[in-house]
């Protein structure tokens, strides 16, 4: 097993040659997640279009983790800082702002993803990637990093409302969910629920391909990896998954002018998530 102390974290702006290899990671995302239409339209372009906001971890020449974020202006057009549509809204706003060519740096960046190779899980690497995203956002002049968090083990209890799930705490006061716990330990503040953060819809045949389930009855279908049940309508031949996330607010890390970010071009030290 490789010691995480040998890993290096940097922004993609610093190491652009890694861009084509960003998705070589062995991932555990459910097969239906990439079929969110907003993800289909924009996510594959984020690293190329916003390389200074995206980070990558390498073990020698191997890419073992990535973190993606985007800038967006929460003050425009009656927008709100933590929208109900969460992940989808942040990504669409980021590209709308980019298309407009807004001249000023917005106060806010939105974290879209932290993905760790399955062979490097449970070594504290996700916490290091989160810290790197905060530093990268700070280096770009943003004051806040907002994360529409997808709780790690919520899928085990799909019928539990997200608001109830988020209220659960351990005896030490930290969230029971491991990924939410990483965010709070990093100084994040749990905000409101984003009840419709992502939406995936498709025909019943598509859902059968994505999940291996029959999708042959009406109602709520429990799907492995889904945080809430999928709504199935056999008469109209479609099913819809509306995923809730949890907004977490972070202050960014603002390094002194001319000083490198503390994680840049240095090995990372793992911690227990």
Image: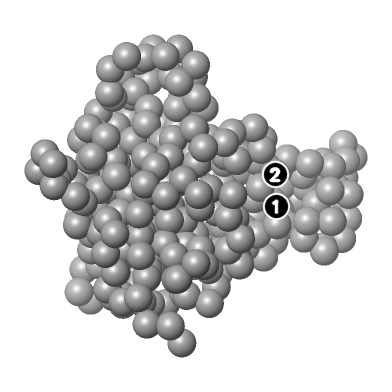
Indicate the secondary structure of the residue bearing disc 2. helix
Quadrant showing the C terminus: bottom left
121 sits to left or right of 139? right
Q: Quadrant of residue 123?
A: bottom left
Q: Which residue is mark 2?
A: 35
Q: In this image, 182 relative to 211: left or right?
A: left
**Numbered disc 1: secondary structure:** loop
Quick one: label 1, few (<14), some, or many (20+) residues within 10 Å?
some
Query: Quick one: 249 or 230, which is closer to the camera?
Result: 249
The residue most toward the bottom is: 1
User: In front: 37, or 57?
Assistant: 57
Residue 74 can be seen in this image: yes
- Residue placed under numbered mark 1 in the picture: 32
Kindly identify the residue that appears in the image at 41 percent across and 31 percent down: 83
Circle 2: is it few (<14), some (14-19), or many (20+) Cα within 10 Å? some
User: Is residue 157 shown to the viewer in this render?
Assistant: no
198 relative to 233 in the view: left or right: left
Residue farthest along the left direction in this orientation? 256
Quadrant housing residue 180: bottom left
Residues tagged 1 and 2 counted as in contact (Cβ below 8 A): yes
Q: Position of residue 217 (x, y in %)?
A: 85, 54
């Amino acid at each position: 097993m490789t010691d995480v102390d040998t890993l290096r974290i940097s922004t993609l702006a610093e190491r652009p040659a890694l861009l084509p290899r960003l998705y070589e990671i062995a991932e555990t995302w459910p097969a239906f997640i990439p079929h969110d239409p907003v993800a289909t339209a924009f996510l594959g372009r984020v690293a190329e279009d916003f390389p200074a906001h995206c980070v990558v971890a390498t073990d020698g020449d191997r890419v073992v983790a990535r973190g993606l974020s985007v800038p967006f202006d929460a003050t425009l057009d009656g927008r709100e800082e933590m929208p109900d549509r969460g992940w989808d809204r942040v990504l669409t706003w980021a590209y709308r702002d980019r298309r407009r060519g807004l001249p000023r740096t917005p106060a806010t960046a939105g974290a879209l993803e932290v993905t760790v190779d399955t062979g490097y899980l449970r070594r504290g690497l996700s916490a290091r990637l989160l810290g790197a995203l905060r530093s990268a956002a700070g280096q770009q002049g943003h004051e806040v990093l907002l994360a529409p968090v997808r709780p790690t083990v919520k899928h085990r209890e799909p019928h539990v409302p997200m608001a109830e799930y988020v209220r659960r705490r351990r005896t030490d006061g930290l969230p029971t969910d491991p990924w939410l716990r990483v965010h709070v330990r990093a100084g994040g503040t749990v905000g409101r629920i984003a009840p419709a953060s992502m939406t995936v819809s498709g025909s019943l045949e598509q859902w059968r391909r994505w999940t291996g389930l029959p999708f042959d009855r009406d109602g709520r279908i429990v799907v492995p990896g889904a945080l809430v049940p999928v709504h199935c309508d056999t008469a109209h031949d479609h099913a819809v998954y509306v995923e809730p996330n949890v907004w977490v607010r972070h202050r960014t890390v603002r390094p002194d002018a001319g000083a490198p970010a503390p994680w840049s071009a240095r090995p990372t030290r793992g911690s227990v998530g």
